[in-house]
Amino acid sequence: MLTKKQIELLGENLSKKIENIARITNPKEIKILIGNEKEFLIEKLLKEKRLVKLKWKNCYLYRTKPYDAARSEASTYIATKKKEDAGPTNNWLDPKRIRKKLFKILKNSMKGKTMYVVPYILGPEKSPYSKVGVMLTDNEYVALNELILAKVTKKAILRIKKGEDFVFGIHSTCKLDPKNRYIVHFPGKNEIISVNTEYGGNAILTKKCHSLRIASFQARKEGWLAEHMMAIQVINPEKESFGISAAFPSMCGKTNLATIKPEKEFKNWKVKLLSDDIIWIHEKEGKAYAINPEYGMFGVANGTNEKTNSNIMKTIKQDTIFTNVGLTKNLEPWWDGLETKSKILEKANPNSRFTVSILKYQNLSKYFFDPFGLKIDAILFGSRRKELFPLVFETFSWEEGVLFGAMLRSETTAAVIENYKQLKNDPMAMRPFLGYNMAKYFLHWLKFGKKLKEKPRIFFVNWFRRDEKGNFIWPGFNKNMYVIKWIIERSKGKVNAIKTPIGFIPNYDEFDFGMEKEKLEKLFEIDKEAWLKEFSDARKFFSIFQNFPKVLSKKLDELEERMKS
C-alpha cells in the first residue's frame, strides 16, 4: 500500500484509485516516478540481465518475446455500453464483463514486483490543449519508455489534484500469455487496461492508447482532432514558414518524411520537426494548429541508415533504447539496411524499434514548445501502393480530401502481427487507433473543416509505385523534397497543375525532378478501369457503416462520373 508521504503527494482521490488496483495486483512495493528515474531503471534492468549495454554511447537493447514484438490489433478492444458506439472497424467488448475478466487476470499479477506510478503530461506543459494521465505498470522496460516518450512529472499530479480530468492506465506484464493478451480502452471512463504484453503500443499506454484511442474520443466531444500524423515546418529560401502534416499507415515512410534532410538541390531550404507520429489539431482564429502530445520517438529501425535517414542516425547514436534489433560481435545494434563490419550474432525483428527523446533531434521546430503549436497549411494522406495512385495529387476540396482519406488502404507491414503484406482499408491511417465509430469520425472531419476559414489543402502521396519489373520508380527518402516543394508552391498559387478526374497533378515542366519523361508519365498515370474498381471497392467498405456521411457518398458518385467520362 501507499505510504503517508505518497498519499500526501498524490492526493486522496488518486491514492484511492491506485490502492484499489494494488489490492488486486498485490505488489511488493509502490514507487512513484517523477521524471528523473531513468538511470535507476536502466541499472535495475542491467542487474537482472534484461537489458544489454551496447557500444553506442548510453544505448541499450531490450528483447521482447517473439510473439510479442508488434501491435496486436486482434487483442485491442474498445469497451462501450453500445456496440455501435465502437463501430464495425473496432473490436468491441461489454465493459462490465471484460472488467471482471481483466481484474481476474490482474489478481496477484504484481506479487513480488514493484508497481510504478507514472504521472504524465501529453503536449506542451503550458498548452491549453495538453492532457494529463497516470499509468501503473510492473514492468521496468515499459516505465523506462514512458520516461522518454511522455513528460513524466509531479506537475501532472498537481493538475489532477486541482480537479482536472485525467486518463488512468493499468498495465501488467502478467505471464505474457498471448491467449489472454488484452489491450482494452474504456473511452467513457478515461481508462485503459493492458495485460499479458510488454511491447510498444500494446503496453506503453501514453502511445497509441491515450494519445490516439482515448484522445480521439475526447477530441470529438471537444471539437478537435487527434491524428496518427507527423508534422514538419518547412522554411523556403524566402524565409517563409509552411506547416505540413501527413497521415501514413505504420512503416509507410512517415518518420522518414518527418526527418527529411534537404540535399544540395535544396541548399537554402530548412525542415524542422514538430512530430514524427501523432498530432492533436485545434482550430484557432479560423486556422488549423497542431501540437505534438509526445516527447519522444518510438521509430522503426529496419531500413534506417545514413543514406535513407542521416538525421535519425545522428539522433539514435546515443541515449537510445533499442527493442528487438540485432546484435554484432562488437555489441553494436544491427538491423536490415544498416552496414556493419562486425560479425552479426543476432538478426533483427522486422519490427525492431528505437526509443529516443525528441529533444535530442537537432532540427526540432521552435513550435514544438509553443502552447498553440504549428499552423498547418497542407495535409497529406499516403499509403504503400505499388500501382494506381500517382506520386502526388491535390484533391479538389476539403470534402474530397476527407473522402480520399476515408478510402485510404495500404499493404500491411510488420508493424502489426495480423494480415502481413495484404491490402487493407486504413482510413486516415487511423483504423487501428480510433476510439469510437468511424462513420462519426468521418463526419467529425467534415464538421471540423467547416470551422476553418483557412482550410489546409489536402494532397495524396504514394512513394511506392513500381514498374513492370517490380522496381520502385521514385527514389523516395530525401528526394521527396521535390514533392514537398511542389505542394508548397501549389498551395501558394505559384505553379499551375494538370486537372485529372481525381485531382490536380504537377505539370511535368514545372515538376523539376531530373527523371525521364516515360518514368514521370508512369508515376502520374491514371488508369480508368483500375480507378473504377477502386471506387467500387471503396463502396463495399463504406457499406459496413450504418450512418456513412451522405456528403462523402455524393462526392464518391461525382468522382466515379468524372472518371467514366
Image (cartoon, rainbow, N blue to C red):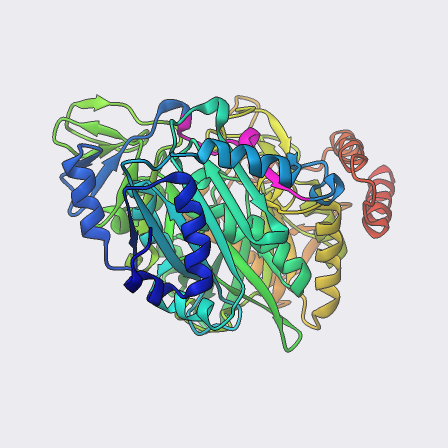
Q: Is residue 320 left or right of residue 47?
A: right
Q: Quadrant of residue 85 in the image?
A: top right
- Please say whether residue 481 is one of the residues in the magenta stretch: no
Q: Position of residue 497 (x, y in %)?
A: 68, 55
Q: Residue at x 74, y 50 (%)?
A: 440
Looking at the picture, does residue 372 appear above or below residue 30?
Answer: below
Q: Position of residue 119 (x, y in %)?
A: 38, 58
Q: Position of residue 246 (x, y in %)?
A: 55, 52
Q: Is residue 564 left or right of residue 490?
A: right
Q: Quadrant of residue 399 in the image?
A: bottom right
Q: Is residue 124 left or right of residue 48?
A: right
- Please say whether residue 77 is one of the residues in the magenta stretch: yes
Looking at the picture, does residue 271 appear above or below residue 304?
Answer: below
Q: Nearer the viewer, residue 115 or 470?
A: 115
First to last magenta residue range: 68-80
- Can residue 512 be seen here? The reply is no
Q: Residue at x 49, y 26 (%)?
A: 180
Looking at the picture, does residue 413 appear above or below residue 138?
Answer: above
Looking at the rendering, in which quadrant would you find the C terminus?
Answer: top right
Q: Nearer the viewer, residue 118 or 355?
A: 118
Q: Position of residue 137 (x, y in %)?
A: 37, 44
